[in-house]
Image: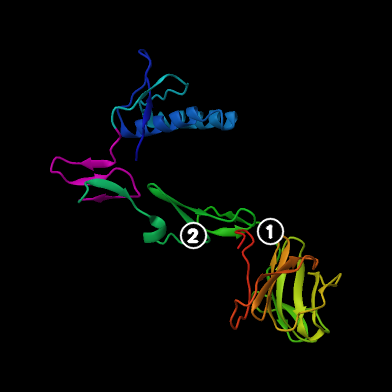
Amino acid sequence: LRIFWIPAVPPKADVSYSSYECLITQTYVDCLLERKDKTCKEAIKLELAMLSMLATRSGSQCVLHTTSSKRRPVQAEIPLEQCDKRGKCKCRLDGYVYDSQTKKCIDIDECDTLEPNCSQKCVNHPGSYECICDPSFFRLEKDNKTCVRNDKDPMWLLFAHGQSIWNISLGGGSFELQKAGLQKTAVLDIDVLERRIYYADVGSNSIERLNLDGTFPHVVQKYEVDGLEGIAVDWIGRNLYSLRRTDIMVQTLDGRYRRALYKGVMRLPRAIAVHPAKGE
């Protein structure tokens, strides 16, 4: 932990840095004051009021200086290490471990060593960690680990089966026919933005789409569908990728501007997938 600035105390100000906790809290206050032009002013006021209240709880004499003032460089860093008279040392804060070789407290990477069980992604911070979710579709639960969906739509698994497309509930208790009358289909993908299914009917040499409710079927492509091993929808970039024999092709979702991304590079391919959020 490195703190490089503390407030210059006015001569008559009743400010005490006698405790480690008080100094840590005051340093955070200073940080808020430094970035007040970049942060919502009302939020700054609320945070300063909250910190002042916490600092004076239980009769503490820690009185925070919550107005901007001239500042001076800190004379020494606040050490994380705390040693007793016998030379036995430990770290003042959780999330650190004392290294007897360097005689320093080093950060524990909880994401790597403690397996914090984040639903989606774990981000390590000095002395702690944070579980985060994809904000486009998920929010973090009160346990600060579990990601839950923002929407309440029921979840279904869509699959192509020969002459038809079906969906099945996650529990497997309910089936629903999505599209019938096809000749030979085995690949599909979803446009989550416009809620459409894209699928290839190799038997009729076509790539088609229809709404998730089964309405408005539309032919996207009527050529070079034989030998197709997979399709993938980039619902952000609004492109359709297809894997055919040894080639990877791309076109817009309505079938225009089709061109080869890679020719003759694949060997025995079976499927293709894209990651729209990362552009991969």
The residue that label 2 is drawn on is 118
Q: Which residue is mark 1?
A: 151
- Quick check: is 96 in the magenta stretch? yes
Q: Closer to the N terminus: mark 2 or mark 1?
A: 2
Name the residue located 54 percent from the left edge and 30 percent from the top edge.
44
Q: In 3D space, how far apart are the residues under numbered discs 2 and 1 (Cα atoms)?
A: 20 Å
Q: Residues within 10 Å of mark 1 (few under 14, many from 20)?
A: few
Viewer-proximal residue among 70 and 82: 70
Q: Quadrant of residue 172?
A: bottom right
Q: What range of the chain is rendered magenta?
A: 77-100
User: Where is residue 195 drawn, in percent x and y?
Assistant: 76, 64
- The answer to whether 230 appears left or right of 10 in the picture is right
Residue in the foreground of this view, choosing between 162 and 146: 162
Depth check, front residue: 63 or 131: 131
Seen from this angle, which residue lies furthest front?
Answer: 264
Amino acid carrying mark 2 in the image: Cys
Q: Secondary structure at mark 2?
A: loop
Q: Position of residue 164 (x, y in %)?
A: 77, 83
- Answer yes or no: is residue 191 visible: no
Element assignment for label 1: loop
Q: Is residue 194 magenta?
A: no
Q: Left or right? Give the position of 234 relative to 22.
A: right
Q: For the point 60% across and 76% down, which residue is it? A: 265
